[in-house]
Amino acid sequence: MDDLPAKVQELIKELDEAAEDEDLDKIKELTQILLKTGVDVETITLEKLSLLVMEGEEEMSQGWTRVAIQAGLDPFKTLIEGLAKGMSLIGAKYEKGEAFVPQLLIASSAMYGGMDLLDPYLKQEKNTASKPLTVVIGTVEGDVHDIGKNIVKTLLSANGFNCVDLGNDVPASRFIEAAKENRATVISMSTLMTTTMAEMPKVIHMLEEECIRDKLLVMVGGAPVTTEYASQIKADVSPHDAVSAASWLKASVLNYPSESARWG
Ligand code: B12
């Protein structure tokens, strides 16, 4: 950002101040001025958002999310390439020993702060079925990491799926109960730890034992989960991120038997 014209840098500084003061009118006015300068507002805003999440600046990240909304940026791109990217940046620092747990937590608050504002802009797209199909979603037992799971949920909800969110640290039996109760079309499991990956095949075995494996799709994901692992445990798929999860699911349900054909 250092190579931007002085006038633009000044505007960015003013937007930082307006964001910190939560001055919505000022944010609106300054965003319009920024757009008129002809600079690449999308790149500036996404970069700002990822840095602000990384630094755990919640008010600022909300303020710049408002800039993104005002500037008409794609809300999905704002979520993934702005807010969520900030979590990856702080995650990389944590892995190098340059950041610690409290910083991870304030970064996640900054990400959620922005994500809440984006929520209404993540448009509902209709499925082929008139009634929304249900996804039972959760992080497996023993694992409390839920940021990625929540992003997957946001994108699936935005694409018209009804998500039953079981939260984190979810016992295998709870996935089964919820799938039956809700006549689910998909179970979506997340884990970020190698130590808890074995919970995923446990759920699949239980589905087989209950003779309901063929009634639904099983999607698994999270950093340590590979496509090879997914096929080894007989899951249907492991898309590598939330965006591909949503597109895979939308395509897969097109020719999938209806809920009543599967659940009676
Ligand atoms: C943030 C974080 C935390 C936060 C979690 C906050 C929260 N509410 O989630 C806190 C501080 C609580 C935490 C705790 C711990 N953590 Co931690 N944590 C991380 C960190 C830095 C970032 C994770 C994250 O949120 N990334 C950002 C999101 C957006 O990315 P994501 O989760 O990968 O999700 C994307 C994809 O994976 C995918 N995805 C995710 N789920 C799914 C599901 C489906 C179906 C699909 C299709 C896709 C998908 O889509 C998402 C977006 O596109 C990672 C390191 C890292 N670089 O990943 C360590 C990491 C996961 N943690 C780790 C560990 C060890 C722990 C602790 C045990 C630490 C401790 N000693 O106490 C505890 C866990 C306690 C427990 N029982 O669970 C290890 C795991 C090591 C391993 N391989 O097993 C990691 C890898 C760090 C490390 N290198 O040591 N952690």
Image: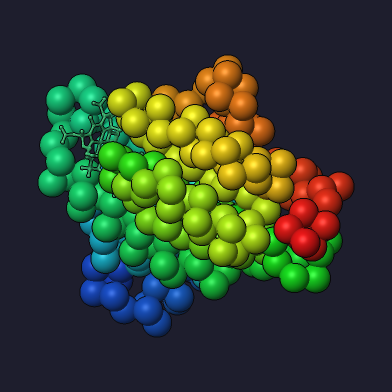
Find residue 100 and report its horizontal and vertical position in percent: 13, 37
* Residue 104 or residue 16, whichever sits in front: 104
* Residue 256 or residue 79, whichever sits in front: 256
Residue 19 is drawn in which quadrant? bottom left
Question: In the current view of this chain or complex, which residue is farthest to the right?
Answer: 255
Ligand 1 is found in the corner quadrant, namely top left
Find residue 228 and report its horizontal and vertical position in percent: 58, 17
Left or right placement of residue 200 versus residue 52 in this view = right
Residue drawn at (53%, 20%), measured in percent from left and top? 229
Q: Is residue 153 above or below residue 30?
A: above
* Residue 36 or residue 243, whichever sits in front: 243
Q: Is residue 230 above or below residue 212?
A: above
Number of numbered markers: 0
Left or right placement of residue 143 versus residue 84 in this view = left
**Res. 45 visible in picture:** no
Residue 142 is drawn in which quadrant? top left
Q: Is residue 241 above or below residue 9?
A: above
Left or right placement of residue 40 versus residue 12 in this view = right
Residue drawn at (29%, 75%), measured in percent from left and top? 22
| Quadrant, the C terminus | bottom right
Find residue 6 and report its horizontal and vertical position in percent: 36, 50
Left or right placement of residue 199 versus residue 239 in this view = left
Residue drawn at (29%, 51%), measured in percent from left and top? 108
* Residue 57 or residue 127, whichever sits in front: 127
